[in-house]
Amino acid sequence: MNTKQNTIEQLTTFYIGSDLFGIEVMKVQEVFRNPSVVPVPLAPNFVRGLINLRGQIATALGLRELFGRPTTELSDQMSVVCKIDGNLVSVIVDSIGDVVEVDGNRFEAVPETIPLNIRRYIKGIFKMDGVLLSVIDLDQLSKELSPAMESLN
């Protein structure tokens, strides 16, 4: 059953290549261009490093790496900063889109044919006019970054 029926959500959208993604607008703290990232030795490849945001430290995650896309050094990459479980996380994306309102009647579950390493980070997909909008699951990203995960490796 579609639990999002008859609801309207606002999403901050962004692109990885030509693919459109979104995050709930209320979870986005800020967006800025060309983040200065300090690498973290021995971190997973999708953890680009740390960013200093006016004295607050954010973990920078590369969505290209997370989704198994080739890494590129685009000069105009953007950082979408979100607060997850009290921690700041910067999601590094190719370019920013718009804030859009989406109708819950257009929400679909992620198809089982999508590989698990990608599917686990997607809440679902909105069918929009001529494009699909994949919604990032910030809670799953938080679990991936939690210290409890370190003890499992």
Image (cartoon, rainbow, N blue to C red):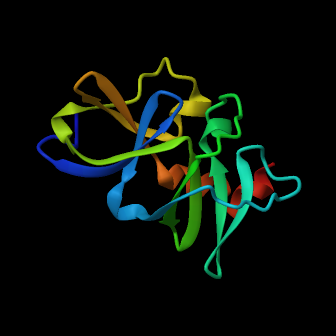
Q: Is residue 39 left or right of residue 13?
A: right
Q: Nearer the viewer, residue 114 or 50?
A: 50
Q: Is residue 27 above or below residue 72?
A: below
Quarter occupied by residue 65: top right
Is residue 70 placed above or below 55 in the rendered structure? above
Q: Is residue 28 above or below residue 129?
A: below
Give the quadrant of residue 50.
Answer: bottom right
Quadrant location of residue 135?
top left
Name the quarter where the N terminus is drawn: top left
**Camera-side residue: 41 or 142?**
41
Residue that lies at the very extreme toward the front in this rendered image: 75
Please name the residue shown 71% across and 34% down the image. 71
Instruction: Give percent across and percent down for residue 95.
Output: 50, 43
- Which residue lies most toward the bottom here? 55
The residue lying at 17 percent from left, 48 percent from top is 8
Q: Is residue 105 above or below residue 12?
A: above
For the residue pair 38 and 137, the one nearer the viewer reads as: 38
Q: Please state if 37 lies on the left or on the right of 17 as rendered.
A: right
In x, y percent, where is residue 142?
A: 57, 57
Q: How many marks?
A: 0
Q: Nearer the viewer, residue 151 or 108?
A: 108
Residue 82 horizontal side relative to residue 22, left or right: right
Percent coordinates x, y for residue 101 in the rendering: 21, 47
| Residue in view at x 52 percent, y 62 percent | 81
Pick out the residue farthest to the top: 113
Query: What residue sits 75% from the left and 58% below the top?
Result: 49
Task: Locate residue 90, reporting x and y percent.
Answer: 58, 59
Give the residue at the far right of this rendering. 41
- Left or right: residue 109 compared with residue 1: right
